[in-house]
């Protein structure tokens, strides 16, 4: 858990995100929420992440929008240019593709192209993740696209405390932040953070200490890695598990320190392996640790395929605890 | 148009001062590019000067404007200083964006010039957000989004007009219809007889005006500004015009109807406006000549300033990526 987390009653990631936005809105009148169905008459979002916000803060600040992703991100960008801090919801990560021009050409670049005269302090919340039989267009992990775009920050919490702390940090950050939520993990309970707790962007967390192999992950896959600990230990492998928390810019210092200790690294994520975040981290590690590694840096992601519908295929798609354990153990042989 | 909104003589002269600046600046830009002293993609606006000049005269400095790659006329009309502009298009550190934006991304928030986009149609979604900010804060400011006829066929136009209407945003969608989207004619690309008609689908007023007529253009602008300030929501203005130098400066114009282009250039709105100001006694030939001479001097100064300004330090490559610079 995060450093300043206090042990109150457990909360879910869903509740933590809701509370973080509410606390931010209460603390700062310039924080806004917009997106499809986000206001209470529309039930506070399809899974209720923003439930209660419009009743408390009014529909001027919490606005349900048409199903129009370019208009949503454009409105967020424009409001941010004149002093507001919008939290825009793009319901599902695949729908960010409809707003890529606004995100990539505008949100990410306006600070640079204006020579620092303007900036775009927006948060784009979006959910994704396999497990609900959603098929090929509702659960992709597309974080590599955004991490590859100069000017964007990308975060992906794995637990309620980080979900709260990263949201508060993202809202206060002067640059655009893509905030990735995992749909099946929304109801995962965990320790509740204290009000105002922030997790600095760009700082990873050592979720479990170990000596033989470093596992780098984020979002729900991180929890799969933690679930793999027993199997790894049974095989005599002590894994150090790092929750990246922020995918871009990523915390090289924490990852380097771990790999310097273990000499082995497995990067695992739900996104397709090819050209994924793991490829970037692996490349950096091989350069930094050339000649010092005990095994080649390994990656474990999804196969090069769209997300399938059929349940056995979907179950075989994303890395799970069993496959992570096998990959980590194989690195030590 | 209703005469209630027609400009008086003093206002017409204000419009003309902008028009003269825009025309002279375009002519100088092409000259400097032709001489090889500057290299850039240049989207000449010659022929379209009346539209932003009238629009900007109906606004205050505090109002906002989001424009596009063919938008230097919009920015100058809204008050971007010549030195900042010229140093920017020369890629120099004294440019308004430190040389990092260039002619397609000029930005000058001090005069409300918030974004210049190189993406067709993308001015409109962002203008909505700025207008949302004005609506929330109640600051009374109006936001203008300019775009071309080609942009009325892209999704962002339709998403933006719909949202602006549903939210009653203080925004003006100003379409500069120069009859060509890149190389393709209006008729070949656009299903609507008039872009203004598309406003009806979004339950907002849509007007088509002769954008080359300062009286008509100003009246439409002023009416739309008053509507927006009064909280009555957005307006779509389709201002008819023509671009004299093709899509991007240097293109061969082979796709253009020669007779149409010749007729448009013969009907150049700038000398017509100028002659009318004199004929109606709003200004004398000497007064206008003095204004124009002053503009030429300002441009001389700006070009010299730009070319004498240093290029940005290479450290600028990684500054302004994030607030704290680029990630290591």
Image (spheres, helix red, strand yellow):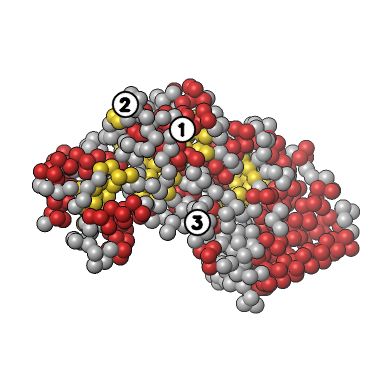
Looking at the image, do the residues carrying marks 1 and 2 touch, with CB atoms under 8 Å apart?
A: no
Per the rendering, the mark at residue A196 is 1
Gap in angstroms between the C-alphas marked 3 and 1? 26 Å
Q: Which residue is mark 3?
A: B325
Please report whichever mark, 1 or 2, sits nearer to the chain's N-terminal start: 2
Residue at the spot x=38%, y=56% of the render?
A148
Residue at the spot x=51%, y=34% of the render?
A32
Per the rendering, the mark at residue B162 is none
The reply to whether residue B253 is visible in this rendering is: no
Indicate the secondary structure of the residue bearing disc 1. loop
Gap in angstroms between the C-alphas marked 2 and 3? 38 Å
The reply to whether residue A204 is visible in this rendering is: yes
Q: Residues within 10 Å of mark 1 (few under 14, many from 20)?
A: some
Pointer 1 indicates a residue of which chain? Answer: A
Residue at the spot x=79%, y=67% of the render?
B297
Q: Image quadrant of residue A124?
A: top left
Q: Which residue is mark 2?
A: A10
């Amino acid at each position: 858990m995060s450093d300043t987390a206090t042990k109150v009653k457990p909360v879910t990631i869903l509740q933590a995100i809701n509370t973080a936005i509410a606390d931010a809105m209460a603390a700062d009148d310039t924080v806004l929420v917009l997106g499809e169905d986000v206001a209470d008459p529309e039930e506070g979002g399809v899974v209720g992440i923003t439930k209660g916000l419009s009743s408390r803060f009014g529909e001027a600040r919490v606005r349900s929008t048409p199903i129009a992703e370019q208009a949503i991100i454009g409105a967020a960008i424009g409001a941010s240019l004149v002093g507001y801090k919008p939290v825009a919801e793009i319901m599902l990560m695949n729908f960010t593709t409809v707003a890529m021009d606004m995100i990539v050409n505008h949100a990410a670049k306006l600070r640079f192209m204006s020579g620092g005269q303007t900036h775009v302090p927006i948060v784009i919340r979006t959910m994704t993740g396999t497990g609900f039989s959603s098929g090929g267009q509702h659960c992709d992990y597309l974080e590599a696209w955004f991490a590859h775009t100069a000017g964007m920050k990308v975060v992906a919490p794995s637990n309620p405390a980080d979900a709260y702390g990263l949201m508060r940090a993202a809202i206060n950050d002067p640059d655009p932040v893509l905030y990735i939520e995992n749909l099946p993990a929304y109801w995962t309970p965990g320790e509740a953070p204290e009000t105002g707790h922030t997790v600095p962007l760009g700082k990873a967390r050592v979720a479990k200490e170990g000596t033989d192999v470093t596992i780098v992950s984020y979002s729900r896959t991180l929890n799969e890695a933690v679930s793999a600990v027993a199997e790894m230990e049974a095989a005599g492998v002590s894994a150090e598990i790092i929750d990246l928390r922020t995918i871009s810019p990523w915390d090289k210092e924490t990852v380097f320190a771990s790999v310097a200790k273990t000499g082995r690294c497995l990067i695992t994520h739900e996104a397709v392996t090819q050209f994924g975040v793991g490829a970037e981290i692996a490349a950096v590690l091989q350069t930094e640790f050339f000649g010092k590694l005990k095994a080649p840096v390994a990656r474990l992601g999804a196969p090069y395929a769209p997300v399938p519908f059929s349940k056995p295929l979907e179950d075989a798609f994303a890395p799970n605890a069993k496959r992570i354990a096998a990959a980590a153990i194989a690195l030590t042989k | 148009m209703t005469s209630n909104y027609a400009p008086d003589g003093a206002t017409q002269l204000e419009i003309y001062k902008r028009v003269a600046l825009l025309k002279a600046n375009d002519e100088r830009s092409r000259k400097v590019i032709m001489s090889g002293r500057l290299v850039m993609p240049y989207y000449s606006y010659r022929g379209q000067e009346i539209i932003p000049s009238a629009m900007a005269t109906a606004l205050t400095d505090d109002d906002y404007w989001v424009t596009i790659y063919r938008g230097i006329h919009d920015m100058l009309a809204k008050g971007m200083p010549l030195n900042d502009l010229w140093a920017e298009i020369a890629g120099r550190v004294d440019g308004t964006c430190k040389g990092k934006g260039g002619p397609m991304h000029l930005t000058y928030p001090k005069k409300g010039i918030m974004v210049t986009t190189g993406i067709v149609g993308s001015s409109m979604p962002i203008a909505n957000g700025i207008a949302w900010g004005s609506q929330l804060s109640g600051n009374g400011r109006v936001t203008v989004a300019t775009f071309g006829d080609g942009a009325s066929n892209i999704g962002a136009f339709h998403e933006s007009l719909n949202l602006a209407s549903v939210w009653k945003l203080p925004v003006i969608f100003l379409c500069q219809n120069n009859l060509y989207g890149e190389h393709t004619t209006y008729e070949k690309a656009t299903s609507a007889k008039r872009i203004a008609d598309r406003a009806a689908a979004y339950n907002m007023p849509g007007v088509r005006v002769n954008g080359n007529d300062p009286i008509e253009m100003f009246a439409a602008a002023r009416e739309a500004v008053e509507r927006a300030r009064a909280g009555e929501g957005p307006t779509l203005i389709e201002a008819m015009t023509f671009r004299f130098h093709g899509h991007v400066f240097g293109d061969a114009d082979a796709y253009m109807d020669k007779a149409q282009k010749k007729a448009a250039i013969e009907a150049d709105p700038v000398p017509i406006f100028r002659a009318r100001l004199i004929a109606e006694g709003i200004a004398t030939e000497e007064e206008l000549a003095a204004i124009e001479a002053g503009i030429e001097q300002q441009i001389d100064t700006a070009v010299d300033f730009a070319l004498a300004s240093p290029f940005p330090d290479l450290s600028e490559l990684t500054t302004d990526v994030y607030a704290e610079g680029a990630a290591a």
